[in-house]
Image: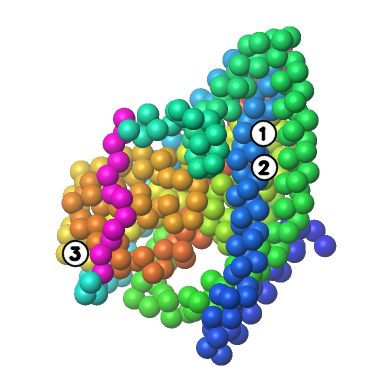
């Protein structure tokens, strides 16, 4: 039985078992005895993420053999992510306004007494820029600061290439270490059905069907946005630029999408995303560069979520946003989503930033805080789908460029 089939079956079984525990009123059993195994699996993925990102990016840069190609792949990747993130914001705003104008968003929701949001809300662009560059390499590794790890990988990869023959030993060491990490990664990925089953059982048993309640419509709005963006932007671009049909694309990306959906961590899904992209035809050196970078800066699902949630929470406050404010949302959400960490729940902090920019009381976040994981599952799934699509497109663009150069 192939791994994708195992993952799908684990997902379905997790939902069924979770519902059973929910309806018999014993969700604590899943918290005590199922979730720990899911947590162990996610911990293993987090353990492997930093060495995978570091070594795969350095190996990818070395494999390109030319700093010009690294630059070429880099700007194409960033351009793809910026364009799709802006599209995601527009899609999120369009559907949020459709729901709002149709009277589908409840406008009578209020915070319960004592509910206060105490997350960080301020973010300065220059502070964020400075924080990308590490002052201590080991601290970047122990904190799993992925932007800093990527900068370190770019510097070491570029340094090894620039050193030429003298860098040959370092090149061989990186290649050898990456081969070892690759085998460890394969072993951990083989355990993914267990992780998917245990995490899904826990989520369903504890959230239950009535978790949707009043918030079912805002959740529906976000998921429609996720699906439309995946089909219109990702599968269409994969078809147009990489020649991969939508059916083949979603079938190939399914294992990573399902795992991202249950783990809610883009960073933890990197190994599986890379494997899916490579199997669909992405060059290994390109996917080694694009996938880790995408897990850090490509947050289209987060952008859609921020736009939908902002319109919804504004409606709950009785506010009507102007076109100018919506443009501000697009810009703020695009920049905020790029700075979102690829870890569960990070989107909430970024949403707080957007609300601050719109002068919407940040405490209103507490209205949707309880079901944030349900938003998070969809937005993480969308994020990694975009990473895979980008890897395929950049591979095709680079191969065309190489043919022209010949």
Residue 317's tag is: 3
- x and y percent of residue 290 in the render? 59, 34
Q: In the rendered structure, are the residues bearing label 1 and label 3 in contact, judged by CB atoms less than 8 Å apart?
A: no
Q: Is residue 395 visible?
A: no
- x and y percent of residue 249 in the render? 65, 48
Task: Decide: few, some or many residues near mark 3? Use Cα within 10 Å; few <14, some 14-19, many ≥20.
Answer: some
Tell me the distance, in whole angstroms, between the alpha carbons under discs 1 and 2.
10 Å
Residue designated by label 1: 56
Q: Would residue 180 appear left or right of 98 to someone viewing this image? A: right
Q: Which residues are magenta?
A: 115-126
Q: Earlier in the sequence, mark 1 or mark 2?
A: 1
Q: Would residue 42 appear left or right of 151 to someone viewing this image? A: right
**Helix, strand or loop status at disc 3:** loop
Q: Is residue 267 above or below residue 223?
A: above
Depth check, front residue: 149 or 405: 149
Task: Identify the residue at image location x=42%, y=40%.
Answer: 338
- x and y percent of residue 216 in the render? 39, 72
Task: Decide: few, some or many residues near mark 2? Use Cα within 10 Å; few <14, some 14-19, many ≥20.
Answer: many
Q: In the rendered structure, are the residues bearing label 1 and label 2 in contact, judged by CB atoms less than 8 Å apart?
A: yes
Q: Main secondary structure of the magenta part?
A: loop
Q: Earlier in the sequence, mark 2 or mark 3?
A: 2
Depth check, front residue: 245 or 385: 385
Task: Identify the residue at image location x=62%, y=64%.
Answer: 38
Quarter of the image where the C terminus is located: top right
**Residue furthest to the bottom:** 24
- x and y percent of residue 266 in the render? 55, 49
Tell me the distance, in whole angstroms, between the alpha carbons under discs 1 and 3.
47 Å
Depth check, front residue: 370 or 76: 370
Tell me the distance, in whole angstroms, between the alpha carbons under discs 2 and 3.
43 Å
Residue 274's tag is: 2
Q: Is residue 382 above or below residue 199?
A: above
């Amino acid at each position: 039985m192939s791994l994708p089939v195992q993952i799908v079956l684990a997902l379905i079984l997790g939902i069924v078992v979770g519902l059973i525990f929910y309806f018999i009123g014993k969700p604590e059993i899943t918290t005590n005895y199922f979730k720990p195994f899911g947590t162990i699996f996610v911990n293993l993925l987090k353990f492997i993420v930093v060495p995978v990102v570091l070594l795969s990016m350095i190996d990818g840069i070395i494999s390109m053999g030319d700093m010009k190609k690294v630059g070429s792949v880099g700007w194409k990747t960033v351009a793809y992510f910026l364009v799709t993130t802006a599209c995601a914001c527009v899609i999120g705003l369009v559907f949020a306004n459709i729901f709002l104008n149709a009277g589908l968003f409840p406008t009578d929701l209020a915070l319960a007494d004592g509910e206060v949001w105490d997350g960080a809300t301020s973010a300065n662009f220059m502070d964020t820029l400075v924080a990308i560059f590490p002052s201590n390499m080991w601290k970047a590794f122990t904190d799993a600061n992925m932007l800093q790890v990527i900068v370190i990988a770019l510097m070491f990869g570029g340094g090894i290439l620039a050193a030429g023959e003298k860098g040959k030993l370092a090149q061989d060491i990186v290649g050898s270490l990456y081969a070892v990490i690759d085998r460890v990664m394969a072993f951990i990925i083989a355990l993914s059905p267990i992780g998917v089953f245990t995490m899904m059982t826990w989520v369903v048993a504890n959230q239950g069907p009535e978790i949707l309640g009043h918030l079912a419509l805002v959740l529906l709005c976000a998921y429609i946005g996720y699906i439309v963006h995946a089909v219109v932007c990702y599968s269409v671009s994969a078809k147009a630029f990489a020649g991969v049909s939508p059916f083949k694309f979603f079938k190939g990306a399914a294992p990573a999408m399902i795992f991202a959906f249950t783990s809610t961590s883009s960073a933890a899904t990197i190994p599986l995303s890379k494997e899916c992209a490579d199997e669909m035809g992405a060059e290994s050196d390109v996917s080694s560069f694009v996938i880790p970078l995408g897990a850090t800066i490509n947050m289209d699902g987060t952008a859609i979520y921020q736009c939908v949630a902002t319109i919804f929470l504004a409606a709950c406050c009785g506010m009507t946003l102007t076109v100018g404010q919506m443009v501000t949302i697009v810009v703020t959400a695009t920049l905020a989503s790029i700075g979102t960490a690829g870890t569960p729940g990070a989107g909430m902090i970024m949403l707080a930033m957007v609300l601050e920019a719109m002068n919407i009381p940040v405490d209103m976040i507490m209205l949707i805080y309880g079901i944030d994981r349900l938003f998070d599952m969809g937005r993480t799934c969308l994020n990694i789908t975009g990473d895979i699509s980008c890897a395929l497109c950049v591979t095709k663009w680079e191969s065309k460029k190489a043919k022209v150069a010949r």
